[in-house]
Amino acid sequence: MSISSTTPAASQAAEQQAVPRQRRRRAELSEGKKQERKLGWLLCAPAALVMVVVTAYPILYSFWLSLQRYDLKFPQDRQFIWFENYVTVLTNGYWWTAFGVTLLITVVSVAVELVLGMGLALIMHRTLVGRGLVRTSALIPYGIVTVVAAFSWRYAWTPGTGYLANLFAPEGAPLTERASALAIIILAEIWKTTPFMALLLMAGLALVPDDLLKAASMDGASWWQRFTKVMLPVMKPAILVALLFRTLDALRVFDNIYVLTNGANETSSVSMIAYNNLIKGLNLGIGSTMSVLIFLTVAIIAFIFVKLFGTAAPGASEEGRR
Amino acid sequence: MADIVLDKVTKSYPDGTVAVHGIDLEIADGEFIILVGPSGCGKSTTLNMIAGLEDITSGELRIGGQRVNDKAPKDRDIAMVFQSYALYPNMTVRENMAFPLKLAKLDKATINQKVEEAARVLELTDYLDRKPANLSGGQRQRVAMGRAIVRSPKAFLMDEPLSNLDAKLRVQMRTQVSRLQKQLGTTTVYVTHDQTEAMTLGDRVVVMRGGHIQQVGDPQTLYDNPVNLFVAGFIGSPAMNFLPAAVEDSMLRTPLGDLPLGDRMKRTLGAGDAPRQLIVGIRPEHFEDAKLIDEAQRAKGFEFTAPVDLVESMGSDKYVYFTVEGEHAAAADLEDLAADAGGADLPPQDSLVTRLSAESRVRDGADARVWLNLDKIHLFDPRDGKNITLHEGRAAGVAAS
């Protein structure tokens, strides 16, 4: 087919002109912008101050503690030792085992939660009949206190009396073996937080305009192609935020392990051993060192998500991310 | 390319509401047809049914002679342009336009060639590697058009594609869409609520209301020979003037004066079931300053004197507004129109809009002598809105013998 061009040249010119004009206006506004920015900072100041008091102080204090030999059982031995505690912890197999367990729980549970949560979100988004009931019932696990849920999982897996133990492991004691215990911990985590994931993803689904999906089906996309080529890319910011939240959350896994195994058979997470050293062992130096290391891990992961994957920090606008 | 036939197509929803009532429509191959009507008239539903985005409750839809009721949208080989443009935000302009071709599994070279060709036609070549977010409204609109034309589909469906553009750009794009359609010669179904767009774009216009087709015809036919009050009031800007009328002593008594009736009208109105109360419809351009009328024409019309409310000089002609005393025309159709326009497009009920020659010397506040062309008057039955001046499909005025 041979077709001549149809756009009136005038519209083209007008569109091209629009760009520099905008730029000029930006320069003119800069004085006012400065004032606005100043006001912005002033308005943020009280909240920032409270944040500093309640978060910066404990962080700095635990960092200070981590630089000392400080065991409450031997208070007279308190001594400033620079980074010796870090060497002690990072050369210790106990720490690395816990670190591995934490990573395993995080990766597996977050991955499974993403898939299940997406499925759940799609169901909740598409349901026309009894939408409220579906959404409410899907959110029940998230509404139950983790410790309470963990206890019910523990009883369910207790040999002899637990229905899950009787059903799946009539011979053994699944919570006393490392592999099965970890699997149960992960299962409990997934059961508990999939609804949260689904909720975040559902907010993302609402961002996909109906017209876009209609256009894709007109363009010849199958259901799966619409999902992977249109929905997922459009939802990407929401998915990344959900992943970030859940990853950071899962890294700090504590209550499920505490109730289910109490860290027996090498099922401790880093939070568990930090707690054991700090609160049970009263070793403020080593415990604080572990806390600081957990904090650093969390910070690094958040940094990777935000910088490398371009996850929008909550509340950041489209503009702010560029 | 193909023709599209709607055969008693109905759409009803589970809750019992019927959006489209068994409409029949034959769209010829290569035709540019406009579905127009107020919101909720079923025009978008009809378009979505043709697209396959909504199921057809009953009736048959044939594209190119083939029944497609049960075919998925992707198997119907038609392309659609959405009001929101529905561009994929994660893809560049090039990827957006290539998307349907990629899904059709065409080879890379062909895809590239087709995309470049479409981009050239729509003057998007410089923007191929941009994301939609970095385009202006007009450019986005053209990308949406481009995505439709690369496929060379059997038909284009357009759902208010220009509604999101500003007024000036809309007029430009209107001519562009029209030219593009002529060049490609692809059957096009275009939905709009804007009667100006409908009149200027289409080969034929379908006026819809409440899920029913009111009238189908080329724009001039709809304008000159509206079948009912609704079409008469919907098509045309400024809208037709409506005044109450009654038949008395073989004359038509209206707020403007007693209009003479021709023999044919007398016969029609003399029939047993003929309404006593009527509505007169007169388009603004069928009035003229009586001073500018020559003797030959004067005889064909009717003259009256009225106080001038307001004069708007448009340069080429003058819009002159008069106040009309007395009752207002009332009918269900008029209420629908008023509800749709929000009173914006329709003249206020007690005001008469006339379009007089620019040479007219009428002034605000003064009385003016106005002539009105009796051959162009429409008479409507307020009970069902039917135009009773239509004779063999053509409006003949009230004075014809």
Image (cartoon, coloured by chain):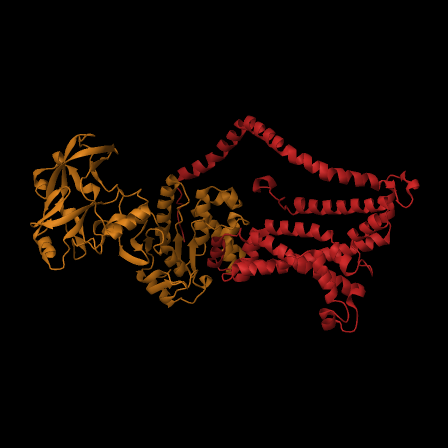
Chain colours: A red, B orange
Does any portion of residue B297 appear in the rendered image? Answer: yes
Q: For the point 28% across and 49% down, which residue is it? A: B335
Q: Which residue appears farthest toward the top when viewing the image?
A: A31
- Residue at point 60%, 60% (across, down): A138
| In the depicted structure, whether residue B125 falls above or below residue B57 | above
Q: Position of residue B129 (x, y in %)?
A: 53, 45
Q: Nearer the viewer, residue A8 or B24?
A: B24
**B227 and B222: which is toward the camera:** B227
Q: Position of residue A263 (x, y in %)?
A: 81, 58
As drawn, B78 above or below A284? below
Residue A237 appears left or right of A172: left
Viewed as shown, does residue A284 lie left or right of A76? left
| Residue A6 image offset from top left, x and y in percent | 39, 45
Q: Nearer the viewer, residue B190 or B16?
A: B16
Asked if residue B185 shows in the view, the reply is no
Numbered circles on residues, count: 0
Identify the image quadrant of the N terminus of chain B: bottom left
Q: Tell whether B186 sits left or right of A216.
A: left
B377 over A116 or under it: above or below: above
B263 sits to left or right of B41: left
Q: Where residue B59 sits in the image (x, y, percent)?
A: 35, 67
Where residue B50 sits, quadrant-wise, is bottom left
The quadrant in which residue A265 appears is: bottom right
Toward the viewer: B331 or B399?
Answer: B331
Residue B374 quadrant: top left
